[in-house]
Image: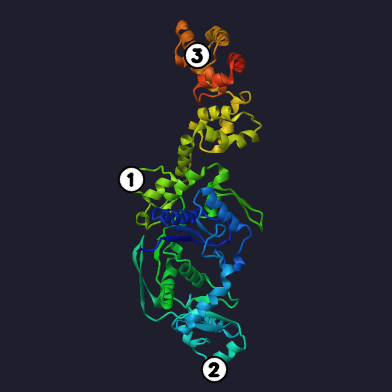
Amino acid sequence: MSKKIRTRFAPSPTGPLHMGGVRTALYCYLFAKKNQGDFILRIEDTDQTRFVPGAEQYIVDTLKWCGIEPNEGFEFGGNYGPYRQSERKAMYRKYAEELIEKGHAYYVFTSDDNWPTVKEELIKQGNPSPKYDNVTRQYLKNSLTLPADEVQKRLEAGEEYAIRYKMPRNEEVRFEDKIRSWVSFNTNQLDDKVLLKSDGMPTYHLANVVDDHLMEITDVVRGEEWLPSTPLHVKLYESFGWEMPSFSHLPLILKPDGKGKLSKRDGDRLGFPVFPLNWTDPETGEQSQGYRERGFLPDAFVNMLALLGWNPGTEQEIFTLEELVEAFSLERVGKSGARFDFEKTKWFNQQYIKSKSNEELALLTKEDFEKHKYEASVEKLAIICDLIKERATFLHEFPSLGYYFFEDVREYDTKNLVKKWDGTKEPFFMDLINSLNSLETFSAEEIETCVKTKMEAAGLGFGQVLPILRISITGTMQGPPVFSVMSLLGKSICSDRLHKGITLAKSL
């Protein structure tokens, strides 16, 4: 019987969650759900010096907003906790000591570690990046080179120490990656990483492997920046004698020009967010806008992220979360970086706005309308949203796109008004106003019939009448069907605006 699939998203709380991190969480979620497995959130805060207040809650809020909530983990509960590594500190030393007993690790006494001096000397001698590895360790002070009795005395005296992994010499480490197929490293390329720091905190490498084993993680899905660390993790699994999870290393999200990893600086420079939610730096007070506050729907954001590196193998671009779960496979994630396209991201948002019901849009935009002092019932907002949603890219644009439903026209397209107006049309429009005012039902259909009847009687075409009518009512040639707009505005307002339009046209 195969083991139940368990994936984990394990971010560090060092600041706001980058959209690349959200994509990793999304792929972990999709893979787990596709295989009826569990998706776990673990906070990897072993580096306490980089901890940023508020970052943990930001991670949780982001996953909830995106609709990819873990069914187990930090803030979500479960049987494998605690899910914050700093709360698991006591358990890691035991595993580091076990590696020493098995001959796979060794002590480095903090007070007598001569590596910084030797490293500086090697740099002076022309080695730009010397490593603490299977060659240099034999010339350094550690439990491999010090007499055994001296090591024991130091330990009994309570001297501070770190524990490093003893990387074997000239071995090939091979592992299969679901995205990159077989990957191979030679251990001579690798250094002896610190596993346990002198303050008792584990490094990422030890904590990551121990926690994945104890939490029964079957599939590790993470960014490609962790690929060079994977051979050490493979060796750690071997050294402990544990079953190893499968690995999948995701490609980078690239800048729009494809040259390098997408960063916050790129977003600032080119005018788009790189974080899912607003973030205020607790130290500097610097504010960064998020996709949510920019007016993006979470469904659109998730859909865009899913296709940023993964190819469904079909022409389909719009997916619900359920459809993504059904279609997703790690084998269809590309090896090369995925170029970010903000225009395409906006397109996704447009598609999702169009697909929302008018009632949903009314509820989503009600607060934005109220910020502009535009008061209306949800029922009326639903009608307005239906009329203007075709032109909206963001939710916050609705009030500006439909302002003329709540206040007088602010600005007229006088250029087109001049083109279409001549003095002979005034009698026609004055007669049209009277006819519109006499309509029993001021519906879009009745208004359209009235206008067409008057045009035919006067021998005028749509191009001679509709532009003047539309500019008078909304100020612009663009926008929703003018008869529907007029019906919602009502007779009195339409009459006033047509009078103003005629007066303006005559004055130009």
Q: CA distance from mark 2 to mark 3?
A: 102 Å
Rendered view: 223 above or below 117? above
Q: How many discs appear?
A: 3
Q: Which residue is mark 1?
A: 314
Q: Which residue is mark 2?
A: 149
Q: Which residue is mark 3?
A: 446
Q: Residue at position x 41%, y 42% from top?
A: 318
Among the two numbered marks 3 and 1 on one chain, the one whose residue lies closer to the N terminus? 1
Q: How far across and down, in percent of the image, does residue 358 sit?
A: 51, 32
Q: CA distance from mark 1 to mark 2?
A: 67 Å
Name the amino acid type tagged 1.
Thr
Contact (Cβ within 8 Å) of mark 3 with mark 1: no
Rendered view: 358 above or below 498? below
User: In this view of the protein, which residue sits in the foreground, 194 or 408?
Assistant: 194
Q: CA distance from mark 3 to mark 1?
A: 46 Å
Q: Residue at position x 53%, y 83% from top?
A: 107
Q: How far across and down, in percent of the image, does residue 406 sit?
A: 62, 26
Name the amino acid type tagged 3.
Glu
The image's mark for residue 80 is none
Q: Residue at position x 53%, y 78% from top?
A: 94
Q: Secondary structure at mark 2?
A: helix
Q: Secondary structure at mark 1?
A: loop
Name the amino acid type tagged 2.
Asp
- In the rendered image, which quarter contains the C terminus? top right
